[in-house]
Structures are given as structure tokens and as C-alpha cells.
Amino acid sequence: MGWPNRTGRALVALAGLLGAVNAQGYFGTVQNEIASCGSDNFIYLGCYADFLNQAGANFFQFNAQAYNSGDPSRSFPDWDPGSNYNNTMSPVGCARVCRGFGFKYAAVRDNNCNCGLQLPAALVPGLDTFCNVPCGGNSLLTCGGGNYAQVYIDPTFASPLYTPITTLNATLANYYKYLGCYSISNGFPTQDPRAQQTFTSIDDCFSTCAALGYPLVFGSPQGFCTCGTSFGYPSYRVHPELLPTPGDCTHVCNTPNGAGGDCDPTTTRCCGTSNYYPVYINPELQGCYTPQIPGYKSTSTQVLYECDDIDSSYFGPPHSLPLGLYPLSQTINAVPALVHPLHVVGGARDYYIYGCYPQQALNQGGVTGVFAPALSVQVPGFTPATLENCAAQCNTRNYDAFGMINGV
């Protein structure tokens, strides 16, 4: 359907975008990252062939998404990784997203952005000419191609020489510190099956998470181990003495039927239960930016968080391990991201989103109808029934606005 031009469309669209960005403020912003790190100082490592088979299957599981109220744990401010109408994909954009969730590496492949903590030694860079797909967020840049991925590293993390890929790493595990008791109902949003395992001893749990490169870890007395880089929604910190069942956050590990409250997490590796867990953090496995850590609440229904000041020694960059050495010539330029308001091109016209309406509001005529019968027309069926094709149909008929429902 189409209808003549109406003013105010761009203003409404921008208001909608601002609302979505504000809703994501809890998870941090690019401004927070730059304030912590000083700049977008990411290093380009090269164009890697056979990326999916060698690295994507295990090491680059995490992918961010645009704001999703049903799953905000992977949402990132100003990020839209794949829409045809508002794509912000670029190398620096992807690297910022990965840094925002606490990851060391960013991989851009065919306009997909994935984050990882380790890069397999068998993966070697090939010719840059194979990474030739224009970026959706800036067509002057490339974003991988086919099974080739452009890989970037945050140089404020420890050198890969000191965080090797192993099964267990007790040396790195020694750097974990007790962060606090947290209510964690949905775990950490890692998307990595290796980050959730069973363990025979709590030391193996910590050594496993350290070997995988994860800075956060918690365990349960039933022998479950969870690693992560950032907290999932709707986690919050609790005062252990105010727990509904005192001792839930201070269980001796591997004792599922008792010993609650008998473990001191400040001096010992302890476990938790009933969604309350002592969380430990490793500053040697972090970079210059630490994802936001939730503050105190008494219940999940409490709206506001109580501020939680954590000592800076708990955060990265590493205090003991040395940083990697990278050629400054490989530092990528933090060019301003192109602005892509929500729109679709149809011939000579750019159609901006006016809003989302229920079906009855789009019917022609009636008090609530958006389309006036005398000024609009229903376009006959066309294939494929895409927004671009609908825009093109309305453009040829000289209409300045259109709407679609179920392909019509």
C-alpha cells in the first residue's frame, strides 16, 4: 500500500532510535570504552582463510545483536549487525562490540561479527585480497569474505604467549580474586559450550576457565563450573548476610548436601547454590575495558541498583603478565561510523520508517486507517515480496510512503 507524502517521518524514526539506545545504557557505551582505554587502539592481524573450520566452530562463539528486550545480555548500544536498513558493521565497530563484552579478539567475516578470547596457532593469515566484501556500515571498508575473516586484537590484553591454549592452566588460575556474591539466574552470555562444564575439583574449574581465557568464574557444590567475560541479564550483587537462606553463597564445593556457610570466599575457592554464587575475577585475563559489573539489589524486582565500588586492582589491563608487541602500522583507524537512519531505497526515493502499526490501522479507510482510500492504492502481488521491491513499486507510481503486512 502507498500514500502521499507526510511530514515528520524522520523525526519519529530518530525518536525511536534514541529510545532504544537509552534502553541499552545498562550495558555500557563506546564512550565508556574510550574513557577507559584512551582510544580505539585495535590491531589488524590479517585475513585468515578457512576461518569457520579452524576457529569459528570453537573459539569465536559470541556474536552481539541489536537491542532485544527479550535477550538484552548480548545487546550493544548503537549496534545493528545485519539489518538491510540500519547496518553499522565495520571493523572498528565490531572491535568495539567485542571489547564492550570483554573479548580479546574480533573477527569480521562476510559482514558477520564474532568475538573470541583465543586464536588457534594453526590459523595463519592469507592474502588480504580475499577479504573483499564491502562493510554494511561503511562501503569504503571491507568486512571479510566467504570463509575468510579479518581478525583484530585488543592490544591491552596479555600477550598470547602467556595465555596459551591448553586444557588446564593452574598458573593463570592463581590470579582469580573474589569479586562478590551475585544472583545469577541466566549465567554468563558466552555462547561457548566449553564455558559450562562439570568438574571433579574446584581447582580444575578455575584452571579450565583460565585455560579458556575467561576472566569470570563461579561453581556450584554439585560440580558445575561456569566461565564468562560479562554478566548476563538480570544479574545483581547481594549482601551474603541478607540472603533468604544464609550460607547459599559460601558452600564448600563438592558437598551438595551440606557445608553451606562453612567456606570463606575471600580466602578459599567456594561455591554457591539457589542462583546465588560467589564470583571470582581475573585481572590478568582482561584488557583496558571491563564490562559493567552490576551493583547491589535485595530482590530481582527492585528497580534501582545500589552502587558498588570495586577496587581497581580487580580490573585489567594485566598487572603481572606482559602485553603483546604489535606493529603500530597495523593499528586500524577509528574513522567515524556512517549514520544509517532506518530506511529503504526504492528508485529515486529514500523511504524512512514512520512507525509500526497493527493491521487494522493499515486498512484503507475507517477512523483509525492510515491509508485514505482516495489517496492510496494497493499494489498487485509481486515477487519477491521484499521492502525494497515494495518501495520500488511505490516509487514508480509516484507515492512517497508505503506500508507492508504479510507481503502485501
Image (cartoon, rainbow, N blue to C red):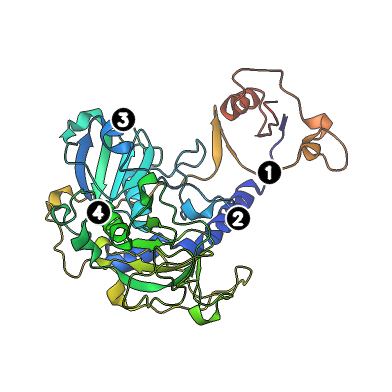
Q: Is residue 76 above or below residue 252?
A: above
**CB atoms of marks 3 and 4 within 8 Å:** no
Name the residue: 46% across, 63% down: 256
Q: Residues within 10 Å of mark 2 (few under 14, many from 20)?
A: few
Instruction: Determine whether, in the image, residue 114 is placed left or right of residue 47.
Output: right
Q: Nearer the viewer, mark 3 or mark 4?
A: 4
Question: Residue under circle 2?
Answer: 15
Image x and y of residue 295, in percent: 48, 73
In the rendered structure, which amino acid carries the disc numbered 3?
Gly
Secondary structure at badge 3 equals loop
Q: Which residue is mark 3?
A: 145
Q: Position of residue 219 (x, y in %)?
A: 40, 61
Mark 2 or 4, nearer chain start: 2
Viewer-side residue, 341 vs 180: 180
* Badge 1 amino acid: Cys
Q: Secondary structure at mark 2?
A: helix
Disc 4 target residue: 211
Disc 4 element = helix
Q: What percent of the width, then of the height, locates residue 349? A: 57, 32
Mark 2 to mark 1 CA distance (whole Å): 13 Å
Q: Where is the C terminus found, in terms of image quarters?
A: top right
N-term mark: 2 or 1: 2
Tag 1 or tag 3, which sits nearer the N-term?
3
Q: Residue at x 33, y 31 (%)?
A: 133
Judge the density around disc 3: few (<14), some (14-19), many (≥20) Cα neighbours within 10 Å: many
Report, in whole angstroms, how far the alpha carbon at label 3 lies from the one at label 1: 34 Å
The amino acid marked with disc number 2 is: Ala
